[in-house]
Each structure stands twice: as C-alpha cells, then as structure tokens.
Amino acid sequence: ISAQSNIMAEIKKLKKEKNAIILGHNYMEYGVQLVSDFTGDSYDLAVKAMKTDAKMIVFAGVYFMAEQAAALNPDKKVLSPDPNAGCSLSDSLDVETLKRYKSIYPDAPVVLYINTSIYTKALADYIVTSSTAVKVVSKLDAKNIIFGPDVNLANFVEQKTGKKLIKVPPNGRCIVHASYTKQLVTLARRKYPNALLMAHPESPIEILDAADFVGSTNQMIKFAKENPNKEFIVATELGMINALKIQVPEKVFYPLVTTEACGCARCPYMAMVTLEKIKRSLEEEVYEVKVPTDVAEKAKEAFERTMKILE
Ligand code: 13P
Ligand code: SF4
C-alpha cells in the first residue's frame, strides 16, 4: 500500500473515533477530496457546516472558510489544518477601509464576498458567494450598494444586474484568476476546438465574455454533468480538475493554465492544506478556530439574511 493510501486510511479511522467530518473545497488535492465527507463550493460547504450533527469539523479549505464555519456553529469544534492558508481577496479588505466606505455611504447596503475575514463580515448586511452574488444584488432595492472585495466579481454582477456597485477596495483581486488573459483563451480554444470554456467569475471580464459558462465551482460541476459536450476548458484554480475528474469521470477537462505554463495555476493557499496536516489536525485537535461571540453573531445574521433573500 502506498504512503498516500496509508494516511488516508488513518484519517478515516480518526474521523470515526472523534465523530468528526471533513469538509473539503473543490480545489483541494485529489486525496483530500477523497477523504472528505462533503466536497463543494464555498456556499455549499458553509450550509453543510450548519446542517451536520458532527461535533467536530475539519475544514479542508482556506482560513476564511473555516472561520465562516466557526461563526455559524459556535457549539462545534472547527479545526483549520493550516491557519496560514490565507486568500489574496480576503487580505485585500480590512475593517478600517470598510468602515470608511460605510461612513461615506451610510444608507448603502454592504454586500461582501465570502472571501473576507470574519471581522469585515460582521460589518456586512449580506454575505455572497460566486454562486449567489448576482441573485442577491438583483434583489436589493437601493441607490448605492457597497460591494467587495473582488473587482472582477463586481464587474460580472454589474453586467448581469445592470446595477452600479461601489467597489471596496477599488482593486481587490484573486491572484489566480486575475492572471488569466484573452491570449490564453485563444490558445486553449485553438488547442481544444471541441471544448466548451467554463470560467469562474473571479476572472477578468474579457474571460467571462469569452466563456460558454460562468459559475461557481459547484455550478461548473453541474454544467459539465448536464451539458452533452464531452470536453471542457476550465478557467479556474487547478485543483478543480480533481473535483471534475472525481465527479464527472466520463468527460475530459483541460485547465486553462497549467503549472508548467504559470506558477499562478495553483492557489498557493489552497495547496497548503495537505493530507498530513489533516491527519495532525484530527489527532491533536488543532488548530481550533475561535471567533469572538459578538463578531460571530453579526456575521451569522448577515449570512442568514442572505439565505432568506435567496429562498
Ligand atoms: P467557489 O465558491 O466557487 O468554490 O470559489 C471559492 C474560491 O476561493 C474561488 O477562488
Ligand atoms: Fe483566494 Fe484566489 Fe486562492 Fe480562491 S483561488 S482562495 S480567491 S487566492
């Protein structure tokens, strides 16, 4: 048996012993997705965290995701295998900047992308994900709407809703998706003429305009399953190919950017979460994510208000 299957077997045993579940983001490495009880996009995983009976949740994703799960589940032990697994979007918006925008536009509802710290979320009215942003903003009846921190998602939401957003900060970007260029799309289309292009809304608008489908990681899985086409070019983080291979094994997927072509293909933060760290997380019950009660309550209110608007 390989070292990889040994560690996977140990993780499965530990999960049982500790009454724990693993929530794994669609960008996780192959083995991490296989040991996860649920895999999904950031919205789906946040909801799954609220619905589980398990007492312990190991969040195999970046830190803001574990923080969100901890805020929504104050009575559960939420563990982050590596709390240094950050996110360039989350890092781009701080509490002071958001407060300043709120004081300039006191009547504007604040819509924050889930890729933010829990302290900024506590100042938001709505918390959206790539799968819900368009729907939520389209339902808001306000002259001004503060939206952050992803400028590419904001541009996409503006295009879809016809509404103008106040972007906070003006230039928040994901280091992976922001590096995609129209030239890469042209090359991929030439190389794979029969493939459809699926793109994540964190990509620049010229990529989204050129795509056959734009959606969250879960929405891409659904599209690939249901569309009769056999081949797809995937304009999102490289780990997504693992999720697609596992869940849609009958189809063929080509990443828009490979690691050979660019160091930006794989999110360095997502890559920090490994099977070894997950095992240690379960064994030693580290690193517990703690959110101050008042902050958690405010963030939870914003999340629940958003779920209501989506009903
Ligand atoms: P999803 O919500 O589509 O899974 O995206 C999360 C993310 O971090 C994208 O880079
Ligand atoms: Fe953040 Fe981009 Fe990594 Fe997603 S892929 S976690 S948005 S840096």
Image: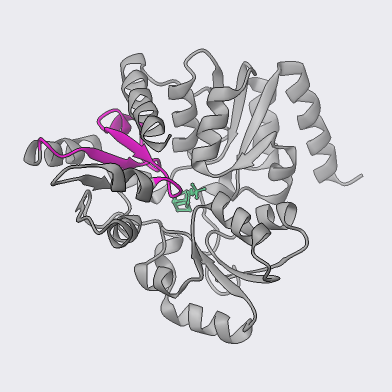
- Name above or below for residue 235 compared with residue 295: below
Residue at the location (71% across, 71% down)? 230
Q: Furthest residue to the top?
A: 75
Horizontal and vertical percent position of residue 197: 55, 71
Report the span colored magenta: 106-132
- Name above or below for residue 226 compared with residue 21: below
Q: Furthest residue to the bottom?
A: 190
Horizontal and vertical percent position of residue 250: 78, 62
Residue at the location (80% across, 45% down)? 4
Q: Which one is nearer the viewer's eye here, 81 or 250?
A: 250
Quarter of the figure with the N terminus: top right
Residue at the location (40% across, 43% down)? 115
Q: How is the image coloured?
A: one colour
The reply, left or right, for residue 223 in relation to residue 35 is left
Horizontal and vertical percent position of residue 184: 49, 78
Say if residue 83 shows up in the picture. no
Q: Is residue 123 magenta?
A: yes
- Name above or below for residue 202 compared with residue 111: below
Q: Furthest residue to the right?
A: 1
The reply, left or right, for residue 52 in relation to residue 100 is right
Horizontal and vertical percent position of residue 138: 30, 48
Q: Quadrant of residue 120?
A: top left
The reply, left or right, for residue 279 in relation to residue 118 is right
Count of picture labels: 0
- Name above or below for residue 290 compared with residue 186: above
Say if residue 78 shows up in the picture. yes
Q: Which one is nearer the viewer's eye here, 276 or 49?
A: 49
Q: Quadrant of residue 304?
A: top left
Q: Is residue 76 magenta?
A: no
Quarter of the figure with the C terminus: top left
Residue at the location (61% across, 29% down)? 58
